Image (tube, rainbow, N blue to C red):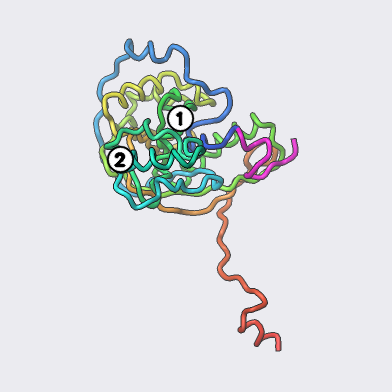
Amino acid sequence: MAAQPESGGAFSRPVAAGLHARGFAGVAGGCAALPGLGARLSETRWPRPPETRIGGKLHRIISTRYPPIDIFERHVPAEMLGALWALEARTNPRLREQAGDLNRVAPRDRLSGPGASIVMAAFTHVGWPSRFSDGGYGVYYAARARETAIRETVHHRELIARDAALSEAEFSMRVWLASPRKPLLDIRGAEWVDLHDDAPRPEDHHQAQAFGAVQRDAGAWGLCYNSVRHAGGECVAIFRPPALSLPVQGAHLVYVWDGRRITHVYEKSEPLLRFDDSDPARDDQRR
């Protein structure tokens, strides 16, 4: 297969809305919910982890292919989203494709305003397994340091590129920064090591997925856990949108794939100044 850019081509369908929703913890392709996992949940018990409050910014990296979703970005009270959704669905048949299923987020947990779609999309687009979900519900994954977020997303981007048999390509990515606002369950201790398995594919995290379902069903805001792809790094898995502030844009990154692996990541700077033929200052210089 010839190299495909981030937009279009054979690479576009497997990674459409899903990557916007999954961030660094999920991979497209063959990822239906795990059969039998729900039945096992009732047989599985864990002690309640301690709660912790963390500070700083949380780094989430997603493809730049997915623009903000207008219905979530508007300055409307979050409690009005349901009515607005119903009204817009009458005239926009692609609303569900673009914005996912709002009913998957409880009315009390919905967010709106600039940046809200980055959070909400993680919960309204579902169907792909990740470390703490079998694909039946969404999770917002982020890291406490940018390097950790990069290493996590590189791992999963490589899986996607290999599955698609991509030759050389560059993936345009955006960092989004949010602050934690609620206490999280702390599973960074040695007693939780079994939840940090290094299975290469997200559908294989069976124990962590069962654990995540139990804690989410109990109303947990989310988890703080150790990165498996970056020694010493820490990540969060958010189960409910109000656990986060509205994200703001961070750096624009490019992941370089050579056909076998991602060889490097660089930060793409935006143009500082553009000149055109009508610029009077430039006309003076040419005289």
State the CA–CA distance, disc 2 to disc 1.
19 Å
Write down the residue under mark 2.
243
Residue 256 x, y percent position in the rendering = 64, 45
Nearer-the-camera pick, 256 or 165: 165
Residue 238 versus residue 249 in the image, above or below: above
Prevailing secondary structure of the magenta residues:
loop
Residue 9 in the magenta stretch? The answer is: yes
The residue sitting at the right extreme is 2
Numbered label attached to residue 126: 1
Q: Residue at x 50, y 43 (%)?
A: 62
**How many numbered tags mark residues here?**
2
Report whether 257 appears left or right of 107: right
Q: Residue type at mark 1? A: Val
Residue 83 x, y percent position in the rendering = 33, 40
Residue 177 versus residue 195 in the image, above or below: below
Q: Which residues are magenta?
A: 1-13
The residue sitting at the bottom extreme is 287
Q: Earlier in the sequence, mark 2 or mark 1?
A: 1
Secondary element at tag 1: loop
Residue 130 in the magenta stretch? The answer is: no
Q: Residue at x 47, y 20 (%)?
A: 33
Numbered label attached to residue 86: none
